Image (cartoon, rainbow, N blue to C red):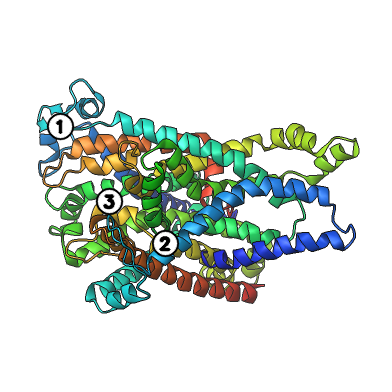
Amino acid sequence: MRIKRTTSTNLILNLFVGICALILVFPLAWIVIMSLKQQAEVMTWPPTVLFVPTLENFRVLFDVAQAGATSYGTIKVDFLTPIANSVVIALGSVIISLLFGVPAGYVLARRDIPLKEDIAFFILGFRFAPVLLVVIPLFSIFQAIGLYDTYVGMIWVYQVVTLPMIVWLSRSYIEDIPKDIEEAAAMDGAKPVRVVLHIVLPLLKPGLIGASLLIFLLAWHNFALGLILSSTKAPVTVALLKLLNPGVQFYPVMAAGLVVTMIIPVILIVIGQRHLERGLTFGAVK
Amino acid sequence: MDFQRSDAIVTLQSSTGQLASSKDEAVTVESRLDWWSIAALAPAITILLGFLLLFFYGVFQSLTDLKFGRPQVHFIGLDNYAALIKTGDFWNSVRATLVYAGSAVLAQAVFGLVLAKLFATEVILARVMRPVILLPLVLPPMSVALMWTTMMDPQNGIMNYLLSLAGIGRFAWISDPNTAMFSLVVIDVWTYTPFFALITFAGLQGINEEVREAARVNGAKAWATFWHIELPLIAPYILIAAVFRLIESLNQFDIIFGTTQGGPGNSTSVLSVRAYITAFQNLAFGRGAALMVVNWMIVLIGTVAMVKLWRFVRQRVS
């Protein structure tokens, strides 16, 4: 697309791109600004742009000793536990998915097993499972067998989201590795397990890290599973909704909570933009 | 692609059948390798089959009068469905689901194309701003929902302020039944247009430069090149993105539950939100499951139709 453009078209195109970028960035910027304001400043009309930034809202979220006491009333917040819950559940889900998903991805990429494509599609199909229909029966079952509101139960049920993705992604990354390398090693007499451990796995590492970032993100996003299947082990997305008390709108505290949930994804973009693009578009972008 | 699931069971059965029969048919396949493969696939497939069983159990529950805490559960056949289709609320939910998903996906396809074309110009700002496209996609949908709830506050939200700068009076956004659905679609479009943009962008980059060159040499105008050459070539990409997005927005729960919870009134009460409220607030699990089964069937029909359209378009292109 190396067309010679006049300076004016160039300028206009840049302008349009800039507007689009602004639309995408502005809501986040506004929320960050709001999280640094005080309640009274948020409620004014027109909205203030000049103000003295305060970290009060973040203190309300995290100060366990004085939890709830704010300069503008009391709200009961415990934000640290949900964050810890989300981290534990998301990390646990990533580890379990890697253990179970990567071998499956390898087989689907390399071995000639019957109906390979059908199995692959069956697995990807769960990415679009009607989660609520699975969760309605699961609610009673979890309560009966004692998995309700436990990390183990949550990590297991999160596999419906993370496992299909890791199988699909690791398969696509393994297919990118030239098959000749494995064949050459096998010719030299290396056993299949050794080929996988010492040759495929090191080559696969960048891809696996990228895929792990993505499924960590998917686990971090999840809301419905935590809402229904947990209470004290609820993830941060559920805690976020509770910040929005009907009637009393502590918008700045909520904005602070939003900033906290959004920081991790934004950091992940910086680390692994290419991998996230590939994962989020199901491999359309390589 | 839920429709794959029922097929997939047949698939798994027949594949074990084939493995069994291959023993008799001499050594065409190295059976040792297959055992490795089965061992590697088994854990993942076992976990997912567990979910599949739960899914069927959910479908079964939709045929019962199960309520939370009720000791006796009766099989009542299709009574839940019969009761549902008699209520106006149910049809309102079906309509809300279709309007939400349909308008959101359509708008995203158009805006996504525009965004992709703009970023494909590779002007300096497009190259610098590329990572920004990803931004809405990596945020938790619940955070997106609450972020927009804050901004769409009719009293002191920034959106109304921006509108007032343009001389437009106060807009009620999600607090009015007439504008709530529109507001939700705006949120969905902001969040998922980048998904279309990324996939369309990949399609645009896949087009052979010589094709464009040939059109240009033959004197085609830029607009004609786009309309007659580029668009047909990227149409399959846009459609596959539409399939993915259609499935997810028909199932959308987080964004709607986080903003309106189906209200005001029941103006945004899509099937998934209604199912949640029926099952977990009114504790009528059987009825809630029935609503989800209806939602799932809509997803199924929509997906099959879109995949058919995609195959048709792809065939015409190639």
Are the two marked residues, 2 and 1, in contact with CB atoms closer than 8 angstroms? no
> Label 3 to label 2, Cα distance in Å?
25 Å
> Quick one: label 3, few (<14), some, or many (20+) residues within 10 Å?
many
| Residue farthest toward the top in the current orientation of the protein | A65
Would you name the residue on which mark 2 appears? B58
Foreground label between 2 and 1: 2
Q: Amino acid at mark 1?
A: Gln
> At numbered mark 2, what does the secondary structure look like: helix, strand or loop?
helix
Please name the amino acid that badge 2 sits on. Answer: Gly
Instruction: Please indicate whether residue B70 sits to the left or right of residue A167 in the image.
Output: left
The residue beneath circle 3 is B258
What element does badge 3 sit on? helix
Q: Position of residue B106 (x, y in %)?
A: 40, 68
The image quarter containing residue A153 is top left
Q: Nearer the viewer, residue A128 or B309?
A: A128
Coordinates of residue B229 in the picture (x, y in percent): 59, 70
